[in-house]
Image (tube, coloured by chain):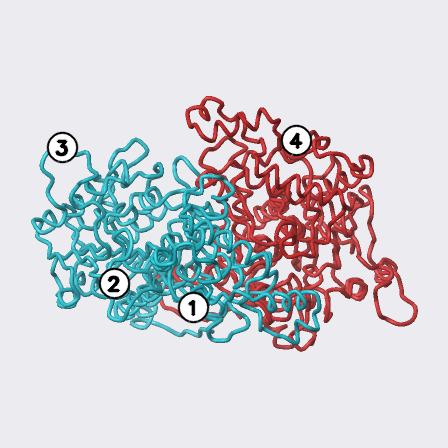
Chain colours: A cyan, B red
Amino acid sequence: MHPAFRFKVSGLASRFILSFFVVLYLAQSVLAAEAKYVFLFIGDGMSVSQASAAEMYKAALKGEARAGVEKLNFSTFPSQGMTTTYSSESLITDSAAAGTAIACGVKTYNAGVGVDVDGKSMPSFAEMARDAGMKVGIVSSVSLDHATPASFYAHQKSRKSYYEIGLELAASKFDYFAGGGFVDPEGKKSKKEGDKVHVVEAIKKAGYSFVNDKAAFEALKSGTKAVVVNPRLQDEQAMPYAIDTRDGDITLADLTAKGIEVLDNPEGFFMMVESGKIDWACHANDAMTAIGDTLAFEDAVAKAMEFAAKHPSNTLIVVTGDHETGGLSLGFSGTKYSTYFKNLERQKVSYVAFDEEFAAWRLANPGAPFEKIAGLVEERFGLKVPTDSELAEMAKAAESSAYAKAVGSKFDMHLKGFELEDLRAAYARSMAAEKDNAQERDYLLYGTYEPFTVTLTHLLNQKAGLAWTSYSHTGVPVLTSAMGVGAASFSGFYDNTDMFTKFVEAMGLAATVAIN
Amino acid sequence: MHPAFRFKVSGLASRFILSFFVVLYLAQSVLAAEAKYVFLFIGDGMSVSQASAAEMYKAALKGEARAGVEKLNFSTFPSQGMTTTYSSESLITDSAAAGTAIACGVKTYNAGVGVDVDGKSMPSFAEMARDAGMKVGIVSSVSLDHATPASFYAHQKSRKSYYEIGLELAASKFDYFAGGGFVDPEGKKSKKEGDKVHVVEAIKKAGYSFVNDKAAFEALKSGTKAVVVNPRLQDEQAMPYAIDTRDGDITLADLTAKGIEVLDNPEGFFMMVESGKIDWACHANDAMTAIGDTLAFEDAVAKAMEFAAKHPSNTLIVVTGDHETGGLSLGFSGTKYSTYFKNLERQKVSYVAFDEEFAAWRLANPGAPFEKIAGLVEERFGLKVPTDSELAEMAKAAESSAYAKAVGSKFDMHLKGFELEDLRAAYARSMAAEKDNAQERDYLLYGTYEPFTVTLTHLLNQKAGLAWTSYSHTGVPVLTSAMGVGAASFSGFYDNTDMFTKFVEAMGLAATVAIN
């Protein structure tokens, strides 16, 4: 590492040595100006705690007591930075203002997509890359007209203008869109007057292949302009949670790999890949589902890393979150200094899938007592409803450490008396279909979620040593990780609007900025 | 360590050009090897949320709606890194294992001070710096024998061996200790047999000036070996919380500035400065008190930055936390996407000071109804106990948004019905001196704290938009910030044990390591 130099040079040799140092010194800056293949991965709602929870879960599965020694691939990137996420009006941003900050470099109000605080359209660096001759791809696990992907190609005063956003997608001249579907493709919620062309028609008319089945997706070739809507969708036109994915489903990693194939060309490309449901799972305080999607997100990043290994001199990969969701922390008052992440493995379905299952169960079992659902609770979440004699044994264990040691981990997944009380109360509310939670105390307990389901994820999370403070986003800064050409500039502590500038500089788009 | 060059080049010009590029290329690494004045600031229990809360509070005081635009000085450092903190046995570390990881570069069990997992003493880089001829200073706002400072000079199988740690301090041959006092200076809790020399006697015998008053502190001169115990202590031999500090008190910044004065010498120095009570305030879920100490910590860092401005070519400043405490998040379910950090300003005393005040009040007001303490609650925490008619008005505002708009912020600090219920229950427990919280539900509500006090800080924090998940530490990684010579190596995502190596390399202590 620390060389000692002894030179004796003249003529040709000195010229060679001179060039050597020139090359060494300038290598970094010269290369930094040539980020030709550029990836931006956005974990919606993902900050340090979300990524760390996934790492600790991976470690726990391997039986590693010192959970935390497993790294997500992007945690090993050489550049790591912290990014503030506040919007123009609030410490706590929404995804529209956050996406706009990253894509367009301006602070805007919550709900603004690709516009500044006055509603004026601002160019995104994805549009600038397109104008500079690069191909552009946009991938998201949620609907393609959702706030985060839309920030890169649309300009709307409200993120709720789904129809208009869909039309902007069709008119974007980007090369590849893939992920979920469209929320309002017929313009039913749009105030626009007159005939409304269907978004999919507009997409086809603009020359895109519209792909909605697996065979056609797999057959997509390099150079095709395509819009891919995953044939399997779950909720709100989004792809299924990773935990609910079935064999053969098209994953975020598949969409990313195909994007690379379709976009790869001598002029370079930019691809944004969003994992949008880490956020949704965190809103619902469902840690295992969030972890599942974080691991699927990591798989997508791995595809870019494989590409970068083949193009090390001109690829840039940046991984970030747009904000934190849920106030997730890696410690719970009840578990004190201990964590039991392996317990999360017992959860078999997302809160959304369980909501559906529970709704059907409620229909089939009107007025059923709590005890009747105990089997399903254990099957789906691993939580055990104790019998009265077990409760008595648990109380004894709580009072005598010797007895507790003797019974060992027998009651690890059994609900304690007060936990059982909470779950019964939530069950009663859910069976009565009381879901509005208008009273503030109820909102604190359940948010806008099914009381029974959210109480189940809360209890399982707490038994793992995880807890939440909110059903909304928070102001906790996010971690930005970068590797490859131009990655160094993503180190440090900066604002989400600075990311725009860093991309513009890394991709050599500065001239385009001046024109805009 | 540094490359040696021997040139014999024909032509003056080529020699000049060659040198120019050599200098350019090697500038960074050459400078990086000369960190002669080295500062390590440890915010105990401080991670991203704690620092961000302080920044958001500063912004809120300035009337900045987009709280988050104010930066702590160390958030502007060019190098920022994430650091994992797990101990050898647990995802969640204690301060002893964390301090040992940073100081000695080894993972150890929770409670181990300066020893490896087998209890074997491991040298700290502070001791290595001493052996290399640098002066060494250790500053802490808590007792000088506490786990974090002790990790740099002591080697004990248990952090609770306060007496033995005190004796190790006296024998350390370090140059400057300053902060709180000693927990067991007479060895009352020590199992050591025979005569027990008083720690302060041992310190004096070792040639230190023992300083315990302000005049003597201020008179301390460069080159004096000194142990400074702050004349004003609050709890457990620790300095007062910043929020409880009176005019004329010696602050952490004062101790840091004096340390620089005492330690500055041609051979260089290393100084560790710990703010130990950010952690204690976070254990107690008292955000305003934690923020106060974080701002006082920033003031101490500022002293090092002033020094660095005078010695830019050979000063290194590193600021980190040893772990996160409390699971603090910058968002609360009840306040959703809003934050009201300015509300925190209404808190006038720390939870410790209020505990004392409340204990006296309870003695003077046996069996007093809750209403009697309402005035004190408002005075100390800004929380208003509503009258029945105000409660009715609040309910009306909650139901009608037009009415809510009309009454404006009139009820911002009024306790809502369910909040009042919680506070009354806590008051009843505290008045009955029920503080053991043995039932788990009570532990979740109050930890090991005075139920009335911790409920007050919870309610005020929630009204600001802040919330907690634990009364213990968590596994959330911490942020490490660095500026100056060798700072670049502190970028990235690494483990707390790696910090030892980074310091050793930055300070050129590698040879010493090989010897040890």
Distance CA(mark 3)–CA(mark 2): 37 Å
Q: Nearer the viewer, mark 1 or mark 4?
A: 1
Distance CA(mark 2)–CA(mark 4): 56 Å
Disc marking residue A256: 2
Is there CB contact under 8 Å for labels 3 and 2?
Answer: no
- Nearer-the-camera pick, B95 or B427: B427
Is there CB contact under 8 Å for labels 2 and 4?
Answer: no
- Indicate left or right for A95 with A404 as reference: left
Report in which chain the residue with disc 3 lies. Answer: A
Q: Which residue is mark 1?
A: A379
Disc marking residue A434: none
* Helix, strand or loop at mark 2: helix
* Helix, strand or loop at mark 3: loop
Q: Amino acid at mark 1?
A: Glu
Marks 3 and 2 belong to one chain: yes
Report in which chain the residue with disc 1 lies. Answer: A
Marks 2 and 1 belong to one chain: yes
Distance CA(mark 3)–CA(mark 4): 56 Å
Q: Which residue is mark 3?
A: A193
Q: Amino acid at mark 4?
A: Glu
Q: Nearer the viewer, mark 2 or mark 4?
A: 4
Report in which chain the residue with disc 4 lies. Answer: B
Distance CA(mark 1)–CA(mark 3): 51 Å
Marks 1 and 4 belong to one chain: no
Report in which chain the residue with disc 2 lies. Answer: A
Q: Which residue is mark 4?
A: B378
Is there CB contact under 8 Å for labels 1 and 3?
Answer: no
- Indicate left or right for A113 with B206 as reference: left
Look at 13% across and 50% down and name the residue there: A200
